[in-house]
Amino acid sequence: MSNFETDAIRINASKSNQREHSAPLYLTSSFTFDSAEEARAMFAEEIQGNIYSRYANPNSSELIEKVCAAEGTESGIATASGMAAMFGSMASLLQQGDHVLASRSLFGSTHQLLTRVFPKWGISSTYGDISDIANWEKLIQSNTKMLFIETPSNPGLEIIDLEWVGNFAAAHNLILVVDNCFATPYLQQPAKWGAHIVTHSATKYIDGQGRVLGGLILGKKDLIDEVQFFTRHTGPSISPFNAWILAKSMETLAVRMDRHCENALNVAQYFQDCKDIDFVKYPFLKSHPQFNLAKKQMKHGGGIITLTLKGGLARAQRFIDELKMISVTANLGDSRSIITHPASTTHSKLSEEERAKVGISDGLIRLSVGLEHKEDIIKDVERALEKSR
Ligand SMILES: *Cc1c(COP(=O)(O)O)cnc(C)c1O
């Protein structure tokens, strides 16, 4: 174990005998055995080794080792997408009759899993408001098995006290799952505060260049073994190519996140002083209601800003249409700055009432601040604000 940056670069699990410096890509569905006896022993798990790429592949193993070092977790599984990771972690550890307590502001598809998919299988859930954790005690039922949270939340940027939630889960004997996609392991490591499972959409900051989908389920070995039984036999495996891209991307995560965060803080400060704004939210702005908590558990404030413009929905749409450089797309965590209107896109499947409960007004805008020069990002925003007045 070295420092974060060094492990992310130097862990090299997929070395062949060709003395290559950069990790090779293992495009193979299966692996050969020296003998019938070796094949038997490997299937019996008496000896370790690669069998079949649905189980493991050197490229996915390298990605997992790097992200485990970054998160401080023992073991992990790489999946084809972030949602395969959210689904796999819940479907494998829950059964009919179980109940999940979740923070209310969740990624849109995670919300669909909890409210539309799992109820069909007799797994129920309740939402707790992050602003009201004092009342979470009352939301626990005799059959509550899991606590599922996101912090900072998407797109509200609400922050949950990880130390509090770790203690709360331990006191009630619940499996604590944290979707750490927004913060990345560079900014916060939920396992340190007691999270049993940490999940990721690697599609976002871990890739960081908007190229591939990927997901991760990380945690203590005994729990991950249980999840692995499920994923091995249901098949959400990541492709070797995507794992190779993501393992390479881990090498630059720290420097990219430093710049994302520096740029985002600067853009947030620009918005704060701007007369067109109703409010702007960013974890490391003093005006964020949980600024002190953000400082306690996050290294920097992250790359996402949310804001509401004066003039509501119509103004928000005019503003988005006037941007010249910033992309209008639903992704985030890309090297390119991205603007999203959650109410009409990522969170459009929620009812208006559900959106109101998680603080998504019609005028809310989410900005994923990229790696372009901060002056050019601000220039684009400034021009579009002026033109949309
Ligand atoms: C994008 C995202 C997901 C889903 O990940 P995919 O890779 O798109 O499947 C889950 N949680 C959060 C917080 C996300 O931003």
Image: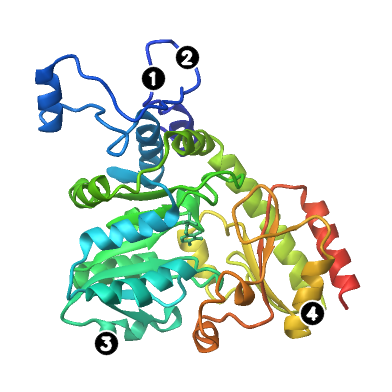
Q: Determine if residue 170 is in view.
A: yes
Dot 1 surroundings within 10 Å: few (below 14), some, or many (20 or more)? some
Residue 315's disc number: 4
Residue at 59 percent of width and 73 percent of height: 288
Residue 20's disc number: 2
Amino acid at pointer 3: Lys
Q: Secondary structure at mark 4?
A: helix
Estimate the x, y position of residue 388 in percent, counting from the top left: 86, 75
Q: Residues under labels 4 and 1: Cα distance?
A: 54 Å
Q: Residues under labels 2 and 3: Cα distance?
A: 57 Å
Label 4 close to label 2 by CB (< 8 Å): no
Q: Which residue is mark 1?
A: 15
Amino acid at pointer 2: Glu
Q: Residues under labels 3 and 1: Cα distance?
A: 52 Å
For residue 362, which quarter of the picture?
A: bottom right
Q: Residues under labels 4 and 3: Cα distance?
A: 41 Å
Residue at 50 percent of width and 66 percent of height: 152
Residue 138's disc number: 3
The one nearer the camera, 72 or 285, is: 72
The first of marks 4 and 2 along the sequence is 2
Amino acid at pointer 4: Arg
The first of marks 3 and 1 along the sequence is 1
Label 4 close to label 3 by CB (< 8 Å): no
Amino acid at pointer 1: Lys
Q: Secondary structure at mark 3?
A: helix
Q: Secondary structure at mark 2?
A: loop
